[in-house]
Image (spheres, grey):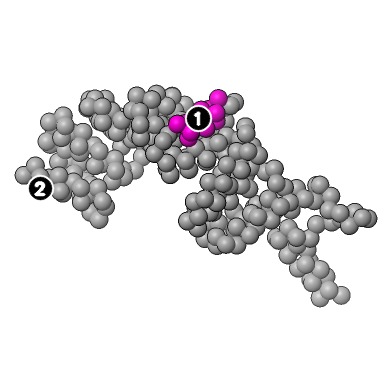
Amino acid sequence: MKSNSIRIAAVILVCSLAAACVTSGPTGKVSEPDKEEAARLNLDLGITYLQQGKLQDALDKLRKSVEANPQNPSAYRVMGFVYEQLQDPARAEQAYRDAVRQGPDDQQALNALAVYLCVNADDVTEPLRYFDRALNLPEYQNRHEIFTNAGRCAMKRNLELAEQYLRRGLRLRADNPQALYLLADVSFRQAQYLQARAFIERRLASGAAQPDALWLAERIETALGDSVAAQTYRARLLGDFPNSMQAQQALEAQRERG
């Protein structure tokens, strides 16, 4: 009797994990609540497999989630990311677009599609339109991230517009390391070196130093003519991140300056 109970429990567990054992009514048709539960469980499993690096298993579960509930933008959004990891750009873009089609007011779906389009295309017109759509929706807790993503995207074509996005994001989270770094970079490219210094100092005070921030700080101080500060940042870069691309760039720049 005990053995039989264990077998039944095991079957229930497998059904829960695979989201394949849904109940049906007298006609044998799966009810809508059961379809929604199957979709949710398969989405959760897909995310778990993705976290484990099991991309094909993740894709299989996400497809089942979409079959059970074709109107859930989250499943398409995660599927788009999986296709990216599988280096299938056509299906990745389609999945992101499907996420927005099913969730036209879903900020995460809009943000994901915009980021994908910005990374994979030179024209920023369309991705910025999706960023703006997301930002025009009611606020949510990670709104500053969309401003930062939009600012990074705008940097490809319009530094002034990029600065506007980034400053708006910084007003929502004053210690956002990415926004501070990008604003320092925008200011440096605009030859506003004192402003760039202020932003990079705030960036380095906001969290652990990264090679890109130290390399930018070195170039800012060089542009300002402060060789002592530039050398200090260069020494930190070479000491903490000797194998980084930025360290190699700093060495090459130093050799060129003599």
Residue located farthest toward the right when viewing the structure as drawn: 26
**Is residue 79 one of those drawn in magenta?**
no
- Above or below, comparing residue 42 to residue 133 in the picture: below
Q: Is residue 218 visible?
A: yes
Residue 214 lies in what quarter of the image?
Answer: top left
- Is 43 positioned to the left or the right of 34 in the image? left
Compare marks 1 and 2 and give the one earlier in the sequence. Answer: 1
- Above or below, comparing residue 225 to residue 12 in the picture: above
**Is residue 132 one of those drawn in magenta?**
yes
User: What residue do we see at 75% from left, 60% from top?
Assistant: 20
Which numbered disc covers residue 5? none
Magenta region: which residues? 125-136
Q: What kind of secondary structure does the magenta stretch mostly adopt?
A: helix
Quadrant containing the N terminus is bottom right
Q: Residues within 10 Å of mark 2 (few under 14, many from 20)?
A: few
| Three-letter amino acid code of the residue under disc 1 | Arg
User: What residue do we see at 80% from left, 57% from top?
Assistant: 22
Residue 6 lies in what quarter of the image?
Answer: bottom right
**Residue denoted by label 1:** 129
Q: Secondary structure at mark 1?
A: helix
- Is 108 positioned to the left or the right of 216 in the image? right
Which numbered disc covers residue 255? 2
Residue 18 lies in what quarter of the image?
Answer: bottom right
Q: Is residue 175 visible?
A: no
Q: Residues within 10 Å of mark 1 (few under 14, many from 20)?
A: some
Q: Secondary structure at mark 2?
A: helix
User: What residue do we see at 80% from left, 51% from top?
Assistant: 34
The residue closer to the viewer here, 109 or 166, is: 109
Residue 107 in picture, x, y percent from top left: 57, 34
Residue 115 in picture, x, y percent from top left: 47, 40
Residue 192 in picture, x, y percent from top left: 24, 25
- Above or below, comparing residue 175 to residue 33 in the picture: above
